[in-house]
Image: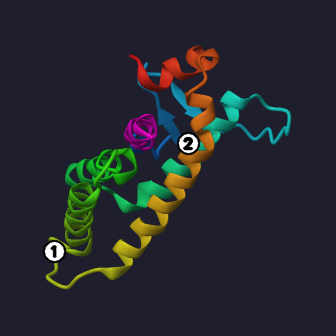
Amino acid sequence: MVAFSWLSVHLLHVVHQYDPVYQSLVLADGSRYKETRNNDPEQDERTQIYTELLGLAKTFYPLQLDNRQLALLSAFFIYNPENMKGSRAEVEKTQENIWMCLKSITESDDDDESPDLRSWAGLLSRVQQFQITVSEMRHFFLNKENIDAMRPLFLA
């Protein structure tokens, strides 16, 4: 499970590298991935993974997450009670505190003192979809045969 937490953090970073002008992901190696119109069911797994990441990026982009929110989301993924052996109470409490901080930041609007509950609901639904998608992709990223396909995502 620790590997899943770190994969989530790294893929959150990848998803945050969305370029709305080119509607593409800017990869760590400086290249771009832009979805092709080819809906070929036989497309390779790498293309499917990249396309799913681009789809996530497009849904996260309207949220305009700032560095505080990204840091808290990363901490939320890392402080996962499922990574613990034995008592999980302290980690669960830490994760709850992280979640409440994230909620507070997301609901607040710097220009207006009224909370924006829609922002929080939008973030919740996207985080849930993100976790489901990363879980489905996990086998690809944990397979050492796919190292060349992963290189542009993580290494400059």
Does the stretch in magenta take in 7? yes
Q: Which mark is residue 99?
A: none
| Residue toward you, 82 or 66 | 82
Circle 1 residue: 111
Horizontal side of 25 relative to 50 (left or right) equals left
Query: Which x, y percent locates residue 100?
Result: 23, 69
Can residue 54 be seen at all in this image of the molecule? no
Tag 2's secondary structure?
A: helix
How many circles with numbers are drawn on the protein? 2
Seen at 19% across and 85% down, the residue is 114
Q: Is residue 10 magenta?
A: yes
Residue 54: quarter of image: top right
Q: Nearer the viewer, residue 102 or 65?
A: 102
Quadrant the C terminus occupies = top left
Figure coloring: rainbow
- Name the residue at 24% across, 53% down: 72
- Location of the N terminus by quadrant is top left
Query: What residue is at 29 percent from the left and 80 percent from the top?
Result: 116
Q: Where is residue 129 in the image (x, y as percent from the top left)?
A: 54, 59
Q: Is the magenta stretch mostly helix, strand or loop?
A: helix
140 to 137, vertically: above or below: above
Q: Earlier in the sequence, mark 2 or mark 1?
A: 2
SS for callout 1: loop
Q: Give the range drawn in magenta.
A: 1-15
Name the residue that disc number 2 marks: 53
Decide which of 105, 27 is in the foreground and name it: 105
